[in-house]
């Protein structure tokens, strides 16, 4: 059976984009997969390129863990861990750093785009080698199904390229080539401003915030300035676009008709979206807060997952070390 692996950075509370794009599809695969064929981790090491304060990163890991569990991840079936607890991955990343040509990484769009956004003085070597660590996360376990959002496609391409490069170098198929697993509908969930919803922007719909904050976020969805009476375009409106991702078909059709008929305001549409989210995710919200109140339980669950992942990682790393003519580690 092909292994599935994915990670979410601990840079904040998971938002609707993370949930629809990655958490829901991954839980569905992981819960059906055979034991030890699914790896789900909290990418706290990757978070360090964005957040300097390690304590914040560490606190955020609880939010990510609670979200996965709230959406029903069966931890008996899957390896659920903090990336930093299985630090063997950084050794593999080092080997990749040494073998992979610098020039290929310089050409990565992901890096070039980041370069444009960040003030030059703040660009770390870690940001540059970010895709290398991600490749190590995946290739350490030979995972082949990688649920991610659209923004991660190039990172998966780089991972494939690293796997190919390394396999050729040692003349053996040591690494399997991974594939991104994405669903067209949910691979790029827009935020309240119509751009990609992202923890680093103030455009999130955070289903795990209080009713009041959630309502505020939904009320801030950008619209055009059409009056209540005017007919509206359901194809270009952001409220409609978000509603279509989570509501049942009949309800979407009803809302579309109201848009086209006129006499239906954006305020009402926002209220409908808010009420639908509250209703649809009520059980997940309850569970999320339960887990957040039980941090020692989360620590215990993640430590157990790390122990299991380490066992597999040691074996794989020793096999890789053997090819490099290094001694085995215990
Ligand atoms: P963020 O970009 O909000 O900081 P992460 O980088 O931790 O989130 O992303 C975790 C996963 O969620 C990645 O696979 C990413 O592609 C996916 N993801 C992030 N934002 C969205 C979105 N708006 N729509 C769909 N998937 C997303
Ligand atoms: N880079 C991913 C993101 O920004 C997080 C991540 C790290 C990841 N390692 C991974 C995702 C391995 C999938 C597989 O969201």
Image (tube, grey):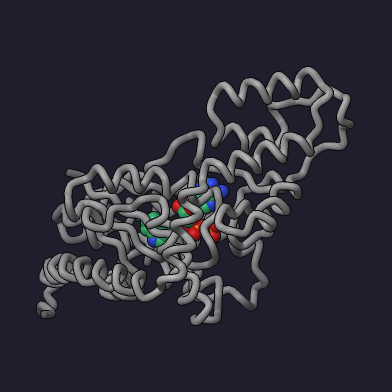
Q: Residue at x 28, y 53 (%)?
A: 74
Horizontal and vertical percent position of residue 164: 27, 52
Q: Eyeballing the image, is 25 above or below 53?
A: above
Residue drawn 65% across the image and 68% down it: 118
Question: Which of the two residues, 71 or 130, is positioned nearer the viewer here?
Answer: 71
**Quarter-wise, where is residue 316 in the image?**
bottom left
Left or right? Give the position of 197 relative to 224.
left
- 96 and 202: which is toward the camera: 202
Is residue 226 at least partly visible in the picture?
A: yes
Q: Residue at x 28, y 48 (%)?
A: 30
For the question of whether residue 103 can be seen, the reply is: no
Does residue 242 appear to the left or right of 19 in the view shown? Answer: right
Residues 235 and 106: in front is: 235
Residue at the spot x=54%, y=62% of the render? 13
Left or right of 40? Residue 267 is: right
Q: Residue 271: name its quadrant.
A: top right
| Numbered label tally | 0
Q: Quadrant of the N terminus?
A: top left
Q: Which quadrant would residue 206 be assigned to in this image?
A: bottom right
| Coordinates of residue 120 in the picture (x, y in percent) | 65, 73
283 versus 248 height, above or below: below
Residue 324 x, y percent position in the rendering: 16, 71
Provide residue 175's location: percent of width, then percent of height: 21, 55
């Amino acid at each position: 059976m092909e292994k599935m692996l994915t990670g979410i950075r601990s840079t904040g509370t998971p938002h609707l984009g993370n949930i629809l794009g990655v958490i829901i599809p991954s839980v569905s695969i992981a819960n059906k997969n055979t034991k030890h064929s699914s790896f789900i981790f909290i990418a706290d090491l990757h978070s360090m390129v964005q957040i300097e304060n390690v304590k914040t990163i560490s606190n955020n890991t609880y939010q990510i863990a609670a979200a996965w569990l709230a959406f029903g991840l069966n931890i008996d079936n899957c390896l659920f861990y903090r990336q930093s607890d299985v630090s063997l991955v950084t050794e593999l990343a080092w080997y990749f750093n040494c073998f992979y040509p610098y020039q290929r990484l310089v050409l990565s769009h992901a890096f070039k785009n980041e370069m444009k956004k960040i003030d030059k003085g703040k660009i770390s070597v870690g940001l540059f080698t970010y895709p290398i660590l991600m490749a190590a996360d995946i290739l350490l376990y030979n995972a082949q199904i990688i649920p991610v959002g659209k923004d991660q496609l190039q990172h998966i391409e780089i991972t494939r390229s690293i796997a190919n490069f390394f396999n050729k170098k040692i003349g053996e198929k040591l690494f399997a080539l991974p594939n991104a697993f994405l669903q067209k509908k949910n691979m790029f969930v827009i935020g309240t401003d119509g751009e990609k919803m992202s923890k680093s922007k103030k455009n999130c719909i955070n289903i795990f915030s209080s009713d009041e904050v959630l309502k505020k976020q939904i009320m801030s969805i950008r619209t055009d300035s059409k009056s209540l009476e005017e007919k509206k375009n359901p194809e270009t409106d952001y409220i409609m676009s978000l509603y279509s991702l989570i509501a049942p078909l009949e309800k979407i059709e009803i809302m579309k008709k109201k848009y086209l008929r006129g006499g239906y305001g954006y305020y009402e549409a926002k209220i409908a979206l808010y009420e639908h989210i509250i209703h649809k995710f009520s059980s997940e919200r309850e569970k999320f807060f339960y887990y957040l109140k039980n941090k020692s339980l989360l620590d215990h669950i993640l430590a157990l997952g790390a122990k299991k992942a380490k066992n597999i990682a040691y074996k794989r790393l020793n096999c890789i070390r053997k090819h490099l003519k290094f001694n085995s580690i215990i």
